[in-house]
Amino acid sequence: MPRYLLVLLLLATCVVGRHTQAGVIRGHIVDPQGAALPFANIAVRGSATSTASNEQGNYQLRLEAGRYELVFQYVGYRPVIEQVRVAGGDSATVLNVTLTPENYKLGEVVVRGSDKDPAYAIVQQAINWRRYHRAEVAAFSARMYIKALFRLTDVPGKILGLIKVGPDLKPGIVYLSESVSDLTFRQPGKIQERMISSRVSGSSKGFSFNRASKNFNFYDNLLQSGFAERGFVSPVAQNALLFYRYELVGTSVQNGITIDKIRVTPRRRIDPAFTGFIYIAEDGTWRLHSLDLSLNADAGIEYVDKMRVEILYAPAPGHPQAWIIQSQKVFLNGEALGFKGNGSINAVLSNYRVTPTYAAPPVVAAAPPAAADAPVRRETVAEVRQQRPRLRAATSNIRREARTRGQQAAATADSGAVAGVEPLAKGEIMHIEQGANERDAAYWNEVRPIPLSDEETKDYRVKDSVEVVHKSRPYQDSLDHIRNKPSPGDLLLTGYTYSNTFARRFILVTPLTTALLYNTVEGAVVNASATFIQRYEDRRNYSLVPTLRYGFASRQLSPSLRGGYTFRPESFSRVGFAVGRTILDFDPGANQQQTAINTPLINSIYTLFANRNYAKYYQRDGLELTYRTELVNGLALSLAAGYADRRELHNTTTELISDVPGRAFTPNEPVAAERPAGTGFGRSRSTTLDVQLTWQPGQQYITRPDGKFNLRNSRYPRLTLGLRQGLRNVLNSDVRFSRLEAGVRKELALGLFGESVLNATAGTYLGNPDLTFIDFRHFAGNRTALAVSFEQFQLLDYYRYSTARRYVEAHFSHHFNGFFFNKIPLMRRLRWQEVATVNYLHTPAAGNYVELGVGVEHIFKALRVDFFTAVQSGQRLDSGVRVGLGF
C-alpha cells in the first residue's frame, strides 16, 4: 500500500457510542436539487449523541424510546431542527431531510479608520481568543467511532518502472476499517485511547490503523497534515495575518448568534496555508463555529493532489461555555509512485463528559447593539488590537488554570473514575483490547452510527467471504508463483525474494551490486549471501544468513553464518549469533552499511577506475553471541560477547580497468596519527564483552494483542551509555582495554523553519589500554564523491584520527524543508529543499576538526547534493561535493 494511504489513517479524531434495545431513526439527506449530501452531521440536541450520513446521504441513529430534537447540519448549509418520537423496541422511523444553502447576507457595512475588509477585524478577534479556546476544555472522556476508506482508481504495472506491483493490488477499495474506542484527554494535550472493537475488511485478524491522537486542532498555530515535512498555518494562528487574505462573504443568524462566513486564501500562492471558508461565531468569544478548508500542491502538500477538511464545533452538553469538535471529516484525492486514488476518514462523538477550564468566559466590554435597521458597523483592526490589554488581563491565568484543572481531571482519570474508562499505563497512548477484532456482524450493525454505503457493503461481503480462500494454501501458492518470478531490477538492485506466504517463510537473495565486488586484498570477490526468515502469527521470528565469500586473487574462501531469534516480541527480546570467517573493514561502520550504494561497492568502483583502494581489510575467525531486550518502557539493554582470531592481510593484486598515470595503490595498512610507526599487527586474538543501555525518556507506545509498538515522538533526547571491555588471557586473548562511551540524539521540530537533528558521542579509554589498531575507536569518514550517509564525516580520512584515547564526535544538521526555496518560484516548482550541516571531531591528535556543509535535498525526490569545507584548528583543509540519497 502506498505510504500516503497509511499516513492518512492517523489524521482523525471523533467519537461514538453504543446503544442497546433502542429504536432507530434513519433517512436520506439531500439538497434542494435532490442531490445527496454525504457526511452531513446529525446530532441530538442537548446531548453528546451524534452521527453522520454516508457517501450516499443515508443516515441512521439508534436512540432509547422518547422524544428528541434532531439537528441536521452541513457546513455552509442552514441547520434544520426536527422533532421526532422514538418508540423503542428496535422500531424504525424514517425521517428524510432537505438542507438548503445558508444565505449569508452582506448588508451595508460602515468601516471607519481602515480600508481593510471587515473580515480582518473579525479574524483578529478570533486570534485574540485563540489561546482561550485552546485551553477551555481541561479534560474530557468520550467514545470514538472512526470509519476510514481508501480506494485506488489506477494502479501501475511497476513502481518507478522497476518494482513489480503485486497481482492482488487492483483498482477499488484497498482499505476499509471501522473502530470504536474509549478516549480520555487532559491538558496539556495528553490523549489516551482504548480500542474496544476493530474491523478491517478482508482481514478478520487485522487491527484498524485508526487513531484519535493524530487530529487537527485549528487553535494550534501550526498543523501537521502528514503529507509534508513542514506544517501548515492555521487561519487563526498568532501570525496568520502574514499568510492569509480574508474576505467577509456574509453573515447569518443561527440560534440567536451571528455567524460570519469568511473566505480565506493564501497571501502568496506558495504559502503553507489553507484555502476555503471559516465560520466565526460572534458570541462574545469569537470562536470557530465550523470550517471547510483544503490544501493542494501550491501549499506544499505532497503525495496527494488535494486534501479537504470539514469540522463542526458544538457546545459541550451541560457546559455551553466549552465547545468541542462535533464531527470531523477528511477527504483526499491524490497520486504517488504511479498510484491514483481517493478516500475519506469520518468520525463522530458520543458519550463524552467534559471538565471545563472556566466556570464562564471572561467578560470583555462590547459595544451596545445597534438598531435593527441601522447599518452594521464593524470594528477596525486597530480598534480590536486596542482591546488586547483588557482581554489579556481577563485571560491571564488561562494556561495555569487549564493545567490545574487538567491535573485534577488526570487524578480522577488515574483512579478509573472518568466515565468508567480504565486508565492506561504511563507512556501508553493506545491500547487495543484482546478480542477487539472478534466482534460479529450483529455487533457492528448495532453500534455503527454511519450506515454502510452500497460499495462498502459489497466490499465487506466479498472480501470477508473470500478471505478464507485468499488465506488458503492453493491461493497463496498461486500468487507466490507470480511474485517469485525474478526481474532484472530485482537481480541487479533490490535483490530477489522467494516467498512461501502460507508458511510465512521467505528467502532473500542479495543483489549483484553486493554479491560481485573488487578490492586489492582479494581481487574479484563473490560475496554470495541469502537470508532465510521464518515468521509466526504471534510476531516471533528467526532468521539465518549464510554467506560464502571467495577472493579469486587471494584464493581465500570465507564461509560464515549469522542468525537470530526474536522470542518475546512485546519486549523486543532477541538472541543472535555470528560464526565463521569474515573479511572486515577496520571501521565497523563500513561493515554495517546495507544500502544499494554501499561502502564495498563504492570502494570497488574507485579501485577499478581511479586507482583508489580506500578500504583496508583484515581477516576475522570467531564467534559472537548477542542479546537485546527492553527492560522497562524506554530502557533497552544490549549485550554482546565474542572471541576473534584476527589476521593482518596484504594486497594480492594490482589489476584495474582504468589506470591513472602516476598513481599507485596504497598498502593494506591504515595510516593513523596515533600510530606513526605503523598499524600492522600480524595476528591478534581478542575476547570482548559489550554492554549498552539506551534510554528514551517519555517514550510513548501502542499496545496491541500481538505486541508493543514504540513511537518516535518523544520530546526528550535519546541517551546511550556503552562499555566495551577487552579481556586478556580469556580464551588466549592478548588485548586489554576498557572503552566507555556516552551518546545523545535529539530531533527538534521548529515549525515552518524546519527540523534539526543532533547526534553526539563522547568516550574515552580507561587506564593504559593494550590493544591493536582494530580495537581503536574509528570514525566514519569519506574520500569519495558519493555519500552513503550524510550523518557522518564527508572529508575526513577514513583512519587517520582513529583513537585509543578520549574523543568527542558530533553531527548536527538542519533541514529547512523549503523555508527559503519556497520563496523562489523556480525552486518552488522543483520542490527542492535546503539543508545545513556541521560535523565535529575532537581527539588528542586531531585537535578540533570541523566540517561545514550546505546542500540541497529532494532533487528528483530522491537525491541530495552538499558542498563541504573542512577546518582544523582554524586552518582550512579541504573542500568537496558529496552526492547521496536525500528523500
Image (cartoon, rainbow, N blue to C red):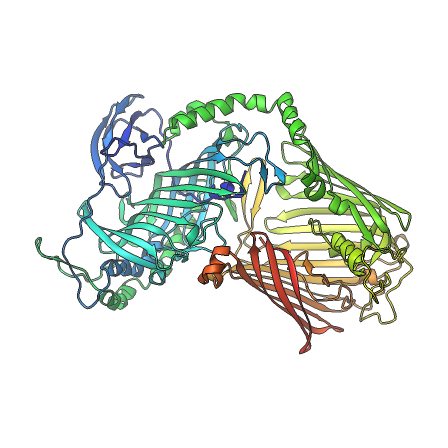
Q: Which quarter of the rendering shows the N terminus?
A: top right
Q: Quadrant of residue 76?
A: top left
Residue under the image location 51 percent in, 39 percent down? 339
Measured from the top left, where is residue 541 in percent x and y?
A: 68, 36
- Is residue 509 or residue 610 the one in the foreground? 610
Relative to 128, say whether 845 is above or below: below
| Viewer can see residue 771 | no
- The residue at the point 77 percent across, 56 percent down is 603
Question: Most extreme residue toward the bottom, as rendered?
Answer: 874
x then y, percent, for residue 440: 46, 24
Find residue 18 and report its image quarter.
Answer: top left
Q: Is residue 80 visible?
A: yes
Position in image of residue 32 (x %, y %): 22, 34
| Residue 248 shown left or right of residue 821 in the figure | left
Q: Is residue 813 left or right of residue 797?
A: left
Q: Left of 491 or right of it: where is 382?
A: left
Q: Which residue is at a point 42% across and 28% down the rendered structure image?
A: 456
Q: Is residue 667 above or below residue 36?
A: below
Q: How many callouts does the rendering have? A: 0
In the drawing, does residue 660 fall left or right of residue 830? right
Residue 651 x, y percent position in the rendering:
89, 58
